[in-house]
Amino acid sequence: MTTSQTMQPTEIAADHALAMPAHVDHSHLVVADLPMVSTWYQRIMGLKPLETSASGETLGVGSRPLLTLTTSGNATKAPRNAPGLFHTAFLVPNREELGRWLAHAAHNNVGLQGASDHLVSEAIYLADPEGNGIEVYRDRPRSEWNFKPDGTVGMDTLPLNLQALYDEVPKHEWHGMAEGTGIGHIHLQVSDIPEADAFFRDVLGLGLMARYPGASFFGSGKYHHHVAANIWNSRGAPKRETQMTGLSDYTIQFKDATERATAVAKLDTLGIAVDRNGDTYSLVDPWGIGLKLAA
Ligand SMILES: [Fe+2]
């Protein structure tokens, strides 16, 4: 075990994605082959099993749960154009940790789908063995982000030099995702962008931080995005069905219960039913994706 793993959970900087008034803290996937997919997330993504239940297990980093995997005999494979997950994005603490994960992936012959410099961040893309999208990324310091007068932030998709990243990191043995890693954002497939703007900005209260053709990026506390929504595969697609593999639901954690209450009240005016279970509110979004609001 390295020193960093025996320390208490890493202090999170005040401008970190997870320190914002709202952030994504959990993703729940329904998978067909639970033991195989769970082993893969442990071996390749370095997540540790934290909890098991009758239907699945929860994996995380340190004591922080991040990903729940469950299986269901009734689940059918989601078609590629169904609303649901584009990727779950794991935010590592710095460029060195991104490089160390890259070296681990390379040494294990993990196929990557791409790597981009987004100006605000550097990102590597892949998929789990059942095709659920994953991003591993690190943020550049906010002092390097280009905030525009309209409140949005400059983002782009430029090639990331993976060889340079690989070459500059020490090739220590890798023992899992670094303490402090969390879900920096979740990127969804939805069927309509104006509808996504209405839901994430006007109802949930996130800021519209950037637009790409066919995609919007929403963030809390001026973070570049905690949620992205695109229609690249899913334009006009019907709602996601309940019994499909892939993203079942994800959780947005609000720091302030009043902000969550405001969001819940707005959901009510849209006629979106919200179930309260203890301290968590659950709903199904306009595209059939489950969403939990925690505070
Ligand atoms: Fe992303």
Image: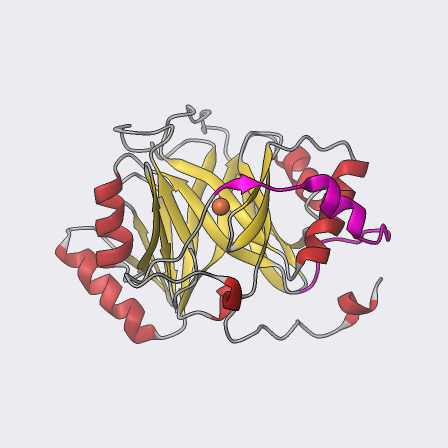
Looking at the picture, the colour scheme in use is secondary structure
Up-down: is 206 above or below 19?
above
Q: Name the quadrant containing residue 192.
A: top left
Question: Total of numbered circles in the picture?
Answer: 0
Q: Is residue 145 left or right of residue 64?
A: left
Q: Position of residue 55 (x, y in %)?
A: 55, 43
Q: In this orientation, which residue lies closer to the viewer: 89 or 53?
A: 89
Q: Position of residue 230 (x, y in %)?
A: 36, 38
- What range is drawn magenta here? 157-179
Q: In this orientation, which residue lies closer to the viewer: 114 or 240?
A: 114
161 is within the stretch colored magenta: yes
Q: Quadrant of the C terminus?
A: bottom left
Say which residue appears at 53% left-offset and 41% top-offset.
158
Q: Position of residue 87 (x, y in %)?
A: 50, 41
Q: In this orientation, which residue lies closer to the viewer: 295 or 51?
A: 295
Say which residue appears at 46% left-offset and 49% top-offset.
186
Q: In this orientation, which residue lies closer to the viewer: 85 or 169?
A: 169
Q: Is residue 8 left or right of residue 262?
A: right
Say which residue appears at 69% left-offset and 41% top-offset.
162
> Can residue 75 be seen in the rendering of this structure?
yes
Magenta region, main secondary structure: loop
Q: Position of residue 236 (x, y in %)?
A: 25, 28
Q: Quadrant of the N terminus?
A: bottom right
> Can residue 67 be seen in the rendering of this structure?
no
93 is within the stretch colored magenta: no
